[in-house]
Image (tube, rainbow, N blue to C red):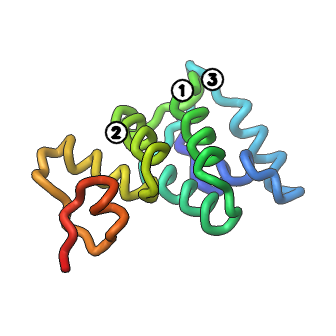
Amino acid sequence: MIGIDTNILLRFFIKDDPVQTPLAVQTIYKLSPEQPGWLSLLVLAELTWTFRRIFKLDRTAIGGAIRKLLYSQDMVLEQAEVVRQALDLYTSTQADFADCVIAVSARFSGCSSVATFDRVAARDLGMQLIE
């Protein structure tokens, strides 16, 4: 298993760099169920943030990319069930993917709530709004 950094995934999906894109594609295509890539929650959070803020992708495209990674036989995702549930929240609310991961992770960890200043996260994810 090999860890995959955010920049490899970005080049693989966006294909915007003539030098790095072929290297990223080659790295991803070398993965297999026997030798999978490993993706951390932080990589997924960075990926979704960059897709949204830098590349202006919509929620459908972002959700599709995460879903493709989640169900790939060639990838192992850290806390895959957290990612699965966070993706469901992300595609059905207006909350950021990272906030969805935080909410689901907190629930899995036994937290009764998550304190936040983020009104969207409070509204859509049931976090406790601190005012």
Crowd band around label 2 with a 10 angstrom C-alpha radius: few (<14), some (14–19), many (20+): many
Residue pointed to by mark 2: 82
Name which residue type carries label 2. Val
Marks 2 and 1, the one that precedes in the sequence: 1
Residue pointed to by mark 1: 71
Q: CA distance from mark 3 to mark 2?
A: 23 Å
Q: Residue furthest bottom?
A: 131
Name which residue type carries label 1. Tyr
59 or 45: nearer the viewer: 59
* 2 and 1 marks in contact (CB < 8 Å): no
From the viewer's perspective, is 127 left or right of 24?
left
Please name the residue shown 37% across and 37% down the image: 85
- Regarding mark 2 in the picture, which secondary structure is present there? helix
Q: Position of residue 121 (x, y in %)?
A: 33, 61
Please name the residue shown 89% across and 57% down the image: 18
Q: Quadrant of residue 25?
A: top right
